Amino acid sequence: MVNKPDFLGGSGQDQFRPELQVESPEGELHLRFFIPSHQEFALPATGIREVIELSPERITPIPNASPLLLGTLNLRGRVIWVADLGQFLGESTALNTDRAEISVIAVQEQDTIVGLAVEEIGGMDWLDVQNLMAPNSVPDTMAPFLRGEWVLKNTSDNMCLRLLDQTAILRSARWAG
């Protein structure tokens, strides 16, 4: 039956379908997400180990740790710290952990992995870093961790998408408490 030409989808001349070809994307792949204050951020996909949706019970609180830290998480046999990214960036609104699942972005640089808990994952998008602009009116607590921002043209109030620097986040002295 496999040898029959009609099983293969016709005469063989129409098997190459150019409409199924994927165009090469512009820019670099980024993960878009929101913190509790509804600000939107992005991280380059190259620095993300994985994105996890997990129950808050899987995060073990650690007494006397920095208030930025929600606790630790066992990620495939490795214990990593999980931080409230919004509070790390200086936002006053804490992440609501009283819900069924929390979104955690595990970022990695060399041997260091940290879980960044966020309000909501927005998805993956190809973004052109050539169009990054200098951050505009950014709080001092956030500025050291930004690489730039894109102004979103399809929004009524010119909202921006801010690109974070995960290396600066992972190396920050702010973790010391």
Image: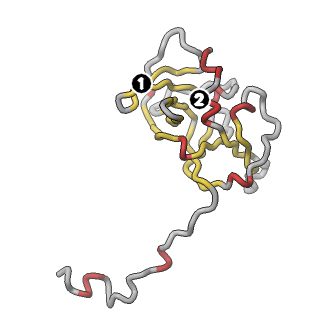
Query: Which quarter of the figure has residue 100?
Result: top left
The vertical placement of 82 against 46, above or below, is above
Question: In percent of the image, x 46 and y 40: which residue is there?
Answer: 50
Marks 2 and 1 close (CB-CB < 8 Å)? no
N-terminal label among 2 and 1: 1
The vertical placement of 91 against 152, above or below, is above
Q: Going by the picture, which residue comes out furthest to the right?
A: 137
Please, what is the three-letter code of the amino acid marked with disc 1? Val
Measure how far apart labels 2 and 1 are at the Cα level.
Answer: 16 Å
Q: Going by the picture, which residue comes out furthest to the left?
A: 1
Q: Residues within 10 Å of mark 2 (few under 14, many from 20)?
A: some
The vertical placement of 36 against 128, above or below, is above
Residue highlighted by disc 1? 79
Q: Position of residue 63 (x, y in %)?
A: 50, 10
The vertical placement of 9 against 99, above or below, is below
Q: Is residue 136 left or right of residue 80?
A: right
Question: In percent of the image, x 51 and y 34: which residue is there?
Answer: 110
Q: Nearer the viewer, mark 2 or mark 1?
A: 2
Residue 170 is tagged as 2
Please, what is the three-letter code of the amino acid marked with disc 2? Leu
Q: Position of residue 125 (x, y in %)?
A: 59, 53
Q: How is the image coloured?
A: secondary structure
- Screen quadrant of the N terminus: bottom left
State the SS at label 1: strand
Q: Residues within 10 Å of mark 1 (few under 14, many from 20)?
A: few
Is residue 104 at least partly visible in the picture?
A: no
Query: Which quarter of the figure has residue 172?
Result: top right
Question: In percent of the image, x 54 and y 41: which residue is there?
Answer: 47
